Image (spheres, helix red, strand yellow):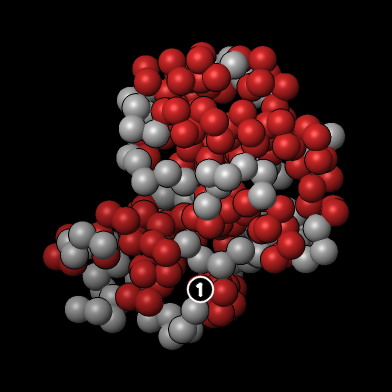
Amino acid sequence: MPLAELVSSLGGRFSLYLGVRLAEKEEKELFRWLLASSLLGAPIREGTAVKAFKAINREASSPQDLIKLGWDRIVELLDISGYTRYDFKTADKLIEMSNNLIERYGSSLNRMHDEAEDSISLEFRVRGLAKGIGPETVVIFLRELRGIWKKANPPLSSLAFLAAKNIGIRAGDKREAVKELLSMWEEEGGDLTNFVDLESALVRLGRDYCKKKKCSICPASGICSSR
């Protein structure tokens, strides 16, 4: 199965699904994606995270909006969306993230990128926005900016790496796997600007099939090396 068919079968980038447009690097859209990534990065169902994002985003689309919305209202919106397990911690994280973005970078995520020395520095800065931002959230946020932000070059997520290994990627670590996978993608006519669609498809493949051992119904069964 060509990689492009895998994307068609499983779906591409998450930001597009949420109606977030990152290509023009507009601050509002970048912050919306940071908000979504912060919610998607928790060990919670994707559908619940999406509901929570939409509920909060209807009332806040900037760090100033989020602070004005307030901790109590954020918790209320999270609870309404079913995001109850992590409601208090997530509200803390979102408020801290917004405050630090304002204080350190004048509300500008583009400025945060520009001030980073390289891709590792950028990852460190994203993670440093709040205590609750972990490595998986950083990967979710930055992989969709690969090819948009010059310094956005995160490793594969754990789920994407699991799926990539099963379809034949030999690299032993998540950063090297990006290079090998991108080379395969380019051989099929893809490029850096749409590589995120393949990464996102692999996340779904890893989450919904590889991790659950659903090999018999896996859309990538024809190219899977683990069978």
Task: Give coordinates of residue 160: x percent, y percent.
Answer: 42, 64
- Write down the residue under mark 1: 174
Q: Report if residue 59 is visible in the image.
A: yes
Is 124 in front, or is 14?
124
Point 42% across, 28% down: residue: 87
Q: Quadrant of residue 176?
A: bottom right
Q: Is residue 39 left or right of residue 195?
A: left
Return the x and y of residue 134 as percentages of the image width and height.
52, 52
Q: Indicate the secondary structure of the residue bearing disc 1.
A: helix
Residue drawn at (63%, 51%), measured in percent from left and top? 127
* Quarter containing the N terminus: bottom left
Looking at the figure, which quarter contains the C terminus? bottom left
Residue 10 located left or right of residue 108 = left
Q: Position of residue 159 (x, y in %)?
A: 39, 62
Say whether residue 144 is visible: no
**Left of 169 or right of it: where is 45?**
left
From what the image shows, is residue 125 above or below residue 62? below
> Nearest the camera: 19 or 35?
35
Residue at 66% across, 49% down: 128
The picture places residue 84, in percent across and down from the top left corner, at 34, 27
Please give the name of the residue rendered at 33% of the width and 75% of the height, measured from the top-left corner: 166
Examine the rendered structure and indicate whether residue 220 appears above or below residue 143.
below
Can you say whether 11 is above or below 154 in the image? above
Nearest the eye: 146 or 3? 146
Spot the residue most to the left.
216
Q: Residues within 10 Å of mark 1 (few under 14, many from 20)?
A: some
Counting labels gives 1
- Dot 1 amino acid type: Lys
